[in-house]
């Protein structure tokens, strides 16, 4: 029903609007961000509810601002992360934490071992699945492959996120990488 706001979400909407009204952020950024949020919510990005999408995008965009200055780039990336993560049953915040640790949101990052892009996907996967013409620096390709790989390891280790993360990183049996991701998740990306 267009224009209907579920009463359950009304307190969250009021809080979000109050936050926007009292936020010290630049007015031009807020109006631009609002417009981007409206466009993002209107798109088919896997959100269950328009209001929930707006609240999530606004919250995550503000958290992502320290890594990506441009509001439009933040919203586009968040939409893609949300879509790729939720289509595989992964919390988008976990993907944000992995990206923070892996590449600090540098879509052109290359590790010393040759992993590429936001989620640091190894190029051999392209050859393994017969699509070597795909570019791991394309955000959608990188997120789709990274989330698929992560889901595979989460299914392999259903009782241990730490072990699944270690598998993702190629460091099974070690805790440094999983601890970094879990710390980033708790510190920056979980809803507070």
Image (spheres, rainbow, N blue to C red):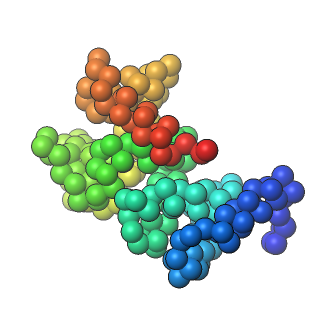
* Residue in the picture at 23% in, 59% down: 108
108 and 68: which is toward the camera: 68
Q: Residue furthest right?
A: 7
Is residue 151 visible in the rendered image? The answer is yes
Q: Quadrant of residue 138?
A: bottom left
Percent x, y for residue 158? 49, 22
* Residue in the picture at 38% in, 42% down: 98
Q: How many marks?
A: 0
In the image, is 163 to the left or to the right of 7?
A: left
Q: Quadrant of residue 91?
A: top right
Task: Examine the rendered structure and indicate whether residue 106 appears above or below residue 155.
Answer: below
* Residue in the picture at 43% in, 33% down: 182
In the image, is 190 to the left or to the right of 98?
A: right
Percent x, y for residue 175? 32, 22
Task: Examine the rendered structure and indicate whether residue 98 appears above or below residue 106.
Answer: above
Q: Quadrant of residue 65?
A: bottom left
Q: Which quadrant holds the N terminus? A: bottom right
* Residue in the picture at 39% in, 36% down: 181
88 and 20: which is toward the camera: 20
Percent x, y for residue 27? 56, 80
45 and 186: which is toward the camera: 186
Percent x, y for residue 83? 52, 55
Q: Which quadrant holds the C terminus? A: top right
Is residue 123 visible in the rendered image? The answer is no
Q: Residue furthest bottom?
A: 28
Q: Residue furthest left?
A: 112
């Amino acid at each position: 029903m267009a224009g209907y706001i579920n009463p359950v979400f009304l307190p969250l909407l009021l809080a979000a609007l109050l936050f926007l009204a009292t936020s010290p952020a630049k007015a031009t950024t807020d109006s631009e961000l609002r417009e981007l949020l409206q466009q993002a919510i209107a798109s088919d990005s896997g959100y269950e509810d328009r209001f929930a999408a707006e609240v999530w995008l606004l919250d995550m965009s503000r958290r992502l601002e320290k890594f990506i200055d441009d509001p439009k780039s933040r919203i586009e990336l968040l939409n893609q992360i949300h879509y790729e993560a939720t289509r595989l049953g992964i919390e988008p915040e976990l993907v944000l934490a992995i990206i923070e640790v892996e590449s600090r949101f540098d879509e052109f990052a290359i590790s010393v071992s040759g992993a590429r892009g936001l989620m640091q996907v190894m190029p051999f996967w392209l050859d393994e699945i017969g699509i070597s013409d795909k570019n791991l620096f394309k955000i959608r390709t990188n997120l789709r492959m990274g989330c698929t790989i992560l889901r595979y390891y989460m299914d392999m280790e259903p009782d241990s996120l730490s072990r699944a993360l270690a598998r993702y990183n190629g460091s099974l049996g070690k805790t440094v990488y999983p601890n970094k991701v879990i710390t980033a998740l708790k510190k920056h990306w979980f809803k507070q």
